[in-house]
Image: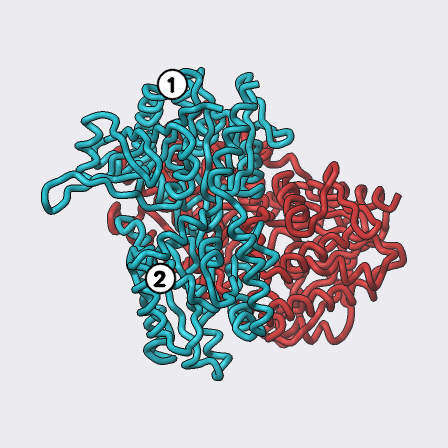
Chain colours: A red, B cyan
């Protein structure tokens, strides 16, 4: 197994900033990937290629590779810096407004998408940044090394990288759902076939669940005319394997953060606010795929139909602001806030408490306190909240979970599964959860905790590396 | 082959009305199905079960079976009458607002659908009307006869009918697209599995193209856990075959209507209005799946980028009002009218001429005159406009055709295919069509006419009957 692992992801493990004292400081990057990967890097030399995002990142990028420290892990970080306009077109314009939308089924086809020349330019920027990532990876990766490319931002990197460095074993992991061909076909042809060609240049393609891997393979069949056998496709004289590697959480790492003072203070405050009321919790990015509006409506239906619960339950909605530069996100977040306000008008000022903040310790504190956790995304690659919550909960909390979240594959036996668009059934699941006898809830929560903790993030990387070694034959 | 053919469809071959003189009159029903089937019935005794829609229909229904005359064809019609509220819930509520939407990908998943109790009631009404159709068919069909059930309104009829009359050979034809499983899974579980079970009780299931048949089979695999082999599924000890039977048009019948005075007058009026300008034509129901908004925008882009064409081309948009009782349809139609108005504000009062009327002879007149016909549905089972237009056009007209219309399978070699959401490429296709040398256009139009006329509607029924006979073994 390779001793040096080259990782490429849009968001790096650290970001740089200038303190008020004028000194450069490293800050741990946000996002689930850093958590998932940092454990795996403890036993390997790591090289991480990521975008320069902050102003200071751009200065660091110009200076060359830099050493980053993550807990016990040291790794070399190379930041890829492109003009801000190019970055915005690649990141917001193409990755988030187009690829994210298509793979989560977020369009309204009679009206959206309506692609314009700006979208063609965004595709150009996407290609350019992917090429830059491939060049940076090609320069830094050791001979016959392994490169693991992350997610939908960098789907073209395998193709560019293979051309530059045919000696490397290349993996690509797709963290989000993969759309079925009718829907992917809504992209301009050049984009959908470019996406598939880019990915098919990897040796191993990783997906969160069999469902998304199979959707990818349906697309290669329908759009690129390539058939798979045992999830393996022969292309250009190579074999590409689509594997399933579900991402897990690191309960030890979560427990550490939950034990820090910030989480302790939040827990105390939330507990005193809660009193003897019961808590229905949501923790999410403020994101269209998360189905926050239907979640609020389902909670409202519970209050509507169960007068006995009014004043005795609260809905804590912790939303992390997301992609504020994309108009669809601002509108959606505003609609969620308005919906919460409307429910409070109707059922009292504390029926819903919606907080818009980026406060991970507070989320961990809330996890320990919920009676019901609502995770109802329309579509979701995995969803780590569904694993984090049950890992930390201490109240025999019940998980109401969308069957379209990747996490449902493993958590189904101990969760209440719902069709995310079915608000009636979601409301029923929430009230069923509240009505469940304590002993049943505790038993269910124990099983759920075991399932939720059952995926070690370092095994996630290990499994991919094994399959990459095998692909070398 | 059976001499009596029992057909069931929501809309019958005739509808009844009272003349100003107080007499009952039969009027030929609208819709492509009547056209497609009437030819096939010339050689068979026909029994047609359909919904009572007009007030007079309900009175006729109470009197029992009635004889209808369609050209040279005589058939027995039995009208199924249910209370108006039940009919509205079955027809608008479930068939058109739910089944039509899901199979054409017309939702905006972050926001719609949001099912309520009214939708559960609509599902109840849908079941009830389907049961009534099954009962009427069971009563009237001769022993060991053949029943052909039509379309998404009546997907449960095969199941109810098989229980009542196991001696019948049952076919079901699905006229519209069939969604892929991720999207169909947005229905409440009871509905999606009810739909699949209902259809799987037929002996032969018909689809317009292999694409929709395969989508259906993906759904039976993902949702009902049933795998197909050679498009055949074993279920309950029976074998169900999913076949492909593309619906065609009857050029002779079209030519007859086009030769009538109404069409002649319309042709004269349109020709004098047109003068020496060239015509870009659209003929459609005012329907969300038809992609009228993007079509108007594409035409606007042509005017924007080609000042030389301004004043020299016109866009005639003939929209047939559709489902005016469904709010989404009214809103969409209004948006189309507003968009046309906006373009005329910008490029002159005759840049777009949008007419909202139900006038088939006028559409046929327009077909003979277009230079470019735009048929760009987001998704469409077949689309008969794409066949009717080229069958009647006399100006070497070019067809710009969505690749998501079933008609694209056969017409592709002689049409300009577009991705329907790609407004840029659609605009380019329209201006390419206008720029094409006359000789090329004529040659292309000749090939297109041959392809468009190449499907005889009576062969459509014959092929299904053959496969049904074969299914009996």
Image quadrant assignment for residue A22:
bottom right
Image position of B300 with respect to A216: above or below: below
Residue closer to the observer: A291 or A113: A113
Q: Dot 1: what SS?
A: loop
Residue B54 falls left or right of residue B213:
left
Residue beneath the point at 37% across and 41% down: B34
The chain holding disc 2 is B
Q: Which mark is residue B318?
A: 2
Residue closer to the observer: B340 or B223: B340
How many marks on residues?
2
Image position of B231 with respect to B259: above or below: above
Q: How far apart are the two marked residues, 2 and 1, measured between alpha carbons?
A: 43 Å
Residue beneath the point at 51% across and 66% down: B396
Residue closer to the observer: B338 or B405: B405
Q: Position of residue B249 (x, y in %)?
A: 46, 47
Badge 2 local density, few (<14 within 10 Å), some, or many (20+)? Answer: many
Image quadrant assignment for residue B239:
top right
Considering every residue shown, the one lying at the far bottom of the view is: B308
Residue beneath the point at 43% across and 32% down: B43
> Mark 1 sits on what residue?
B142
Q: Quadrant of the C terminus of chain A?
A: top right
Residue A353 falls left or right of residue A370:
left
Q: Which mark is residue B19?
A: none
């Amino acid at each position: 197994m390779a001793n040096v692992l080259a990782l490429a992801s849009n968001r790096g493990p650290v970001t740089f900033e200038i303190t008020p004292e004028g000194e450069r400081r490293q800050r741990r990057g946000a996002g689930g990937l850093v958590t998932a990967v940092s454990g795996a890097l403890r036993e390997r030399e790591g090289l991480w290629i990521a975008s320069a995002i902050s102003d200071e990142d751009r200065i660091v990028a110009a200076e060359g590779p830099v050493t980053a420290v993550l807990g016990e892990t040291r790794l070399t970080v190379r930041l890829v810096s492109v003009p801000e306009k190019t970055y915005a077109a690649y990141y917001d314009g193409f990755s988030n407004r187009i690829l994210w939308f298509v793979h989560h089924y977020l369009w309204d086809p009679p009206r959206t998408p309506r692609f314009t020349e700006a979208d063609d330019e965004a595709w150009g920027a996407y290609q350019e940044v992917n090429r830059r990532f491939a060049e940076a990876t090609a320069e830094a990766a050791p001979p016959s090394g392994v490169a693991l490319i992350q997610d939908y931002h960098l789907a073209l990197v395998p193709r560019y990288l293979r051309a530059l460095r045919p000696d490397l074993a290349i993996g690509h992991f797709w963290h989000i759902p993969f759309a079925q061909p009718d829907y992917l076909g809504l992209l301009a042809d050049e984009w959908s076939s470019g996406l598939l060609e880019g990915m098919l240049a990897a040796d191993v393609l990783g997906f969160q669940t069999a469902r998304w891997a199979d959707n990818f393979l349906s697309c290669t069949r329908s759009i690129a005319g390539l058939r798979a056998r045992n999830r393996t496709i022969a292309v250009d004289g190579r074999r590409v394997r689509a594997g399933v590697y579900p991402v897990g959480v690191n309960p030890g790492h979560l427990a550490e953060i939950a034990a820090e003072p910030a989480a302790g203070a939040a827990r105390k405050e939330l507990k005193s606010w809660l009193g003897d009321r019961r808590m229905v919790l949501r923790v999410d990015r403020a994101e269209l795929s998360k189905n926050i509006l239907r979640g609020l409506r389902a909670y409202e239906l519970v209050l509507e139909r169960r007068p006995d619960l009014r004043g005795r339950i609260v809905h804590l909605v912790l939303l992390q602001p997301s992609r504020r530069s994309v108009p669809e996100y601002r509108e959606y977040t505003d609609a969620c806030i308005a919906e919460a306000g409307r429910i409070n008008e109707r059922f009292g000022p504390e029926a819903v408490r919606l907080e818009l903040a980026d406060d991970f310790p507070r989320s961990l504190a809330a996890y320990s306190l919920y009676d019901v956790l609502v995770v109802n995304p329309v579509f979701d690659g995995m969803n780590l909240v569904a694993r984090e919550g049950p890992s930390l909960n201490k109240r025999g909390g019940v998980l109401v979970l969308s069957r379209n979240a990747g996490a449902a594959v493993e958590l189904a036996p101990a969760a209440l599964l719902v069709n995310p668009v079915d608000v009636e059934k979601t409301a029923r699941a929430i009230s069923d959860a509240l009505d469940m006898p304590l002993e049943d809830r505790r038993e269910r929560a124990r099983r759920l905790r075991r399932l939720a903790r059952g995926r070690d993030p370092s095994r996630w990387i290990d499994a991919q590396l094994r399959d990459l070694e095998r692909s070398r034959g």
